[in-house]
Image (cartoon, rainbow, N blue to C red):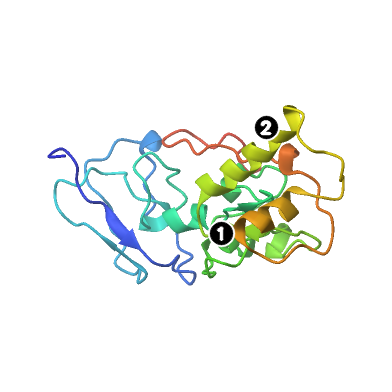
C-alpha cells in the first residue's frame, strides 16, 4: 500500500472542454512531468510530485493508470449497458471518421444519469435509433457478466423454447426493470474492444 499514490476523483466528463492540448501519450515521447489541465471542473487530480506522469486521460481527465490515454473513467464506464451496442471509446471505431473534440467524439464525454442507457451514436454525433438497451449503472463488469451468463446458459442447453425472450428481457428481470416491448437479438456479435494504454490506435482514423 505504501507504493500506491491516489490519482483523483471524477464526477463528470467536462462536456464543454473540447481541447486536446493536455493529452499525454507516452508512446509519442517520454515525459517526466504530468500536464495538468486546470480548466476541468468536474474532477480533481492529485498534484503531488509522486504522481507518475502519463497517468491521466484525454486532455487531463481522470483515468486509470492502465486505461486508454484518450479516454476517461466516466467516458468509458457510462457505456455500460446490455446489450453492449457501443464501443468503450470512439478510438476503437474504425468505420466512422472523427476528430478528437468533434460532435461524434464528444458523445463519449457527455454527462448522463447512471440509469440512462448510453445506446450508440452515428457519424456527426447522431443517436442511433431502434436500439433497446438497459443501463447497468456505469458497471461494465455487470454488463459483461449478464451477457456471459446468458451466452453460457444457451451454449449449455438452457431454455431456448421462447425465441422472443431476448437478452434484454432477461436482463430486465434481473435488474427489476419493465419488460421490453420488442425483441432485441443477443449481443453475442457485439464485441467491446479492450482498452490498452500507451500503444497507438489499432484503427487510426483516415
Examine the image and state in which quarter residue 81 appears: bottom right
- Pick whichever, 163 or 90, lies toward us: 163
Quarter containing the N terminus: top left
Q: Which tag, 1 or 2, sits closer to the chain's start?
A: 1
Task: Identify the element where label 1 is drawn.
Answer: helix
From the viewer's perspective, is the residue at label 1 or at label 2 nearer? 2
**Image position of 180 (left or right of 60):** right
**Where is mark 2, residue-wise?**
152
In screen coordinates, is 65 left or right of 153? left
Residue 168 visible in the picture: yes
Residue 43 location (% of width, % of height): 33, 65
Q: Nearer the viewer, residue 53 or 149?
A: 149
The image shows a total of numbered marks equal to: 2
Mark 1 to mark 2 CA distance (whole Å): 30 Å
Dot label at residue 49: none
> Which of the pair 89/135 is nearer the observer?
135
Q: Looking at the rendering, which quadrant does residue 154 occupy?
A: top right
Task: Provide residue 105's location: percent of width, then percent of height.
Answer: 59, 58
Query: What crowding class fits label 2: few (fewer than 14 Cα within 10 Å), some (14-19), or many (20 or more)?
Result: few
Q: Residues within 10 Å of mark 1 (few under 14, many from 20)?
A: many
Asked if residue 162 is positioned above or below residue 19 in the image, the reply reads above
Residue 79, position in %: x, y?
57, 55
In the image, what residue occupies the spot 63% across and 38% down? 149
Marks 1 & 2, CB-CB < 8 Å contact: no
Most distant residue in the top direction: 156
Check disc 1 and report the residue beneath it. 108
Q: Position of residue 146 (x, y in %)?
A: 61, 45
Above or below for 16 versus 174? below
Which residue is found at the position 50% from the left and 35% from the top?
200
Which image quarter holds the C terminus? Answer: top right
Q: Is residue 81 left or right of residue 6?
A: right
* Snapshot quadrant of residue 122: bottom right
Amino acid at each position: 500500500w505504501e507504493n500506491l499514490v491516489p490519482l483523483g476523483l471524477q464526477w463528470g466528463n467536462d462536456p464543454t472542454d473540447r481541447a486536446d492540448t493536455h493529452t499525454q501519450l507516452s508512446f509519442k515521447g517520454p515525459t517526466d512531468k504530468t500536464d495538468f489541465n486546470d480548466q476541468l471542473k468536474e474532477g480533481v487530480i492529485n498534484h503531488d510530485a509522486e504522481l507518475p506522469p502519463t497517468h491521466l486521460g484525454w486532455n487531463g481527465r481522470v483515468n486509470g493508470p492502465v486505461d486508454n490515454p484518450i479516454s476517461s473513467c466516466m467516458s468509458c464506464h457510462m457505456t455500460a449497458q446490455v446489450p453492449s451496442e457501443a464501443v468503450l471509446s470512439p478510438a476503437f471505431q474504425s468505420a466512422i471518421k472523427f476528430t478528437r473534440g468533434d460532435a461524434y467524439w464528444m458523445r463519449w464525454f457527455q454527462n448522463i444519469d447512471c440509469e440512462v442507457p448510453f445506446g450508440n451514436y452515428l457519424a456527426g454525433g447522431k443517436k442511433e435509433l431502434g436500439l433497446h438497451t438497459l443501463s447497468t449503472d456505469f458497471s461494465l463488469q455487470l454488463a459483461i457478466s449478464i451477457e456471459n451468463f446468458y451466452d453460457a446458459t444457451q451454449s449449455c442447453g438452457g431454455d431456448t423454447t421462447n425465441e422472443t425472450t431476448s437478452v434484454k428481457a432477461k436482463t430486465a428481470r434481473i435488474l427489476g426493470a419493465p419488460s421490453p416491448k420488442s425483441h432485441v437479438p443477443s449481443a453475442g456479435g457485439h464485441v467491446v474492444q479492450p482498452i490498452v494504454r500507451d500503444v497507438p490506435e489499432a484503427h487510426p482514423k483516415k
